[in-house]
Amino acid sequence: MQKTVALSVTEAELIAAVSYTQDMMYAKRILESFGLFVKLPMILEIDNKGTVNLINNWSVGGRTRHVETRQLFLRGLKEQSIFIVRWIAGAENEVDLFTKNVPSKLFEKHRVMFNGEDEGV
């Protein structure tokens, strides 16, 4: 659950992207503290084109001014080549299984990634 109220789907996705990016940075620092190498840029896939465009600075509308701090945080990390943002089609987004009611065909397609296949099937 997000701790703030979003006024649009794009803003909600941007809030989630910032939260996820902070988690990515935390995991990166932990791995590096163990002496492990983290290949950069890390990839952040988002299924909302408006959010991808805001982060990549391809479009800014007058109604998105209130999300500027989050947007600038992500752009700064992107410009430092710490991560890149890519759009992914909703049908290809496996994590939708955890956040949305997906049709059974799509559920079966992505279920294998998390559960694997049964041996006798």
Image (cartoon, rainbow, N blue to C red):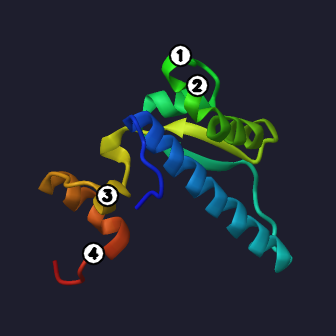
The answer to the question of whether label 1 and label 2 lie on touching residues, with beta carbons closer than 8 A, is yes
Task: Mark 1 or mark 3: name the one nearer the start of the chain.
Answer: 1
The spot of residue 88 in percent (x, y) is 44, 39
Q: Secondary structure at mark 1?
A: helix
Q: Amino acid under label 3? A: Thr
Image quarter of the N terminus: bottom left
**Mark 3 to mark 4 CA distance (whole Å):** 22 Å
**Badge 1 density bin: few <14, some 14–19, many ≥20, Cα 10 Å:** few
| Residue at x 54% of width, y 48% of height | 17
| Residue at x 21% of width, y 52% of height | 106
**Mark 1 to mark 3 CA distance (whole Å):** 29 Å
Q: Secondary structure at mark 3?
A: helix
Q: Quadrant of residue 25?
A: bottom right
Q: Amino acid under label 2? A: Arg
Task: Identify the residue position indicated by label 1 in the image.
Answer: 62
Relative to 110, say whether 62 is above or below. Answer: above
The spot of residue 65 in percent (x, y) is 58, 25
**Mark 1 to mark 2 CA distance (whole Å):** 6 Å
Q: Secondary structure at mark 2?
A: helix
Relative to 5, say whether 35 is above or below. Answer: below
Q: Amino acid under label 1? A: Gly
The answer to the question of whether label 2 and label 4 lie on touching residues, with beta carbons closer than 8 A, is no
56 or 108: which is nearer to us?
A: 56
Asked if residue 40 lies left or right of residue 49, the reply is: right
The answer to the question of whether label 3 and label 2 lie on touching residues, with beta carbons closer than 8 A, is no
Task: Identify the residue position indicated by label 2 in the image.
Answer: 65
Task: Identify the residue position indicated by label 4 in the image.
Answer: 117
Asked if residue 20 lies left or right of residue 88, the reply is: right
Task: Identify the residue position indicated by label 3 in the image.
Answer: 99
Task: Mark 3 or mark 4: name the one nearer the start of the chain.
Answer: 3
The spot of residue 52 in percent (x, y) is 53, 32
| Residue at x 60% of width, y 19% of height | 58
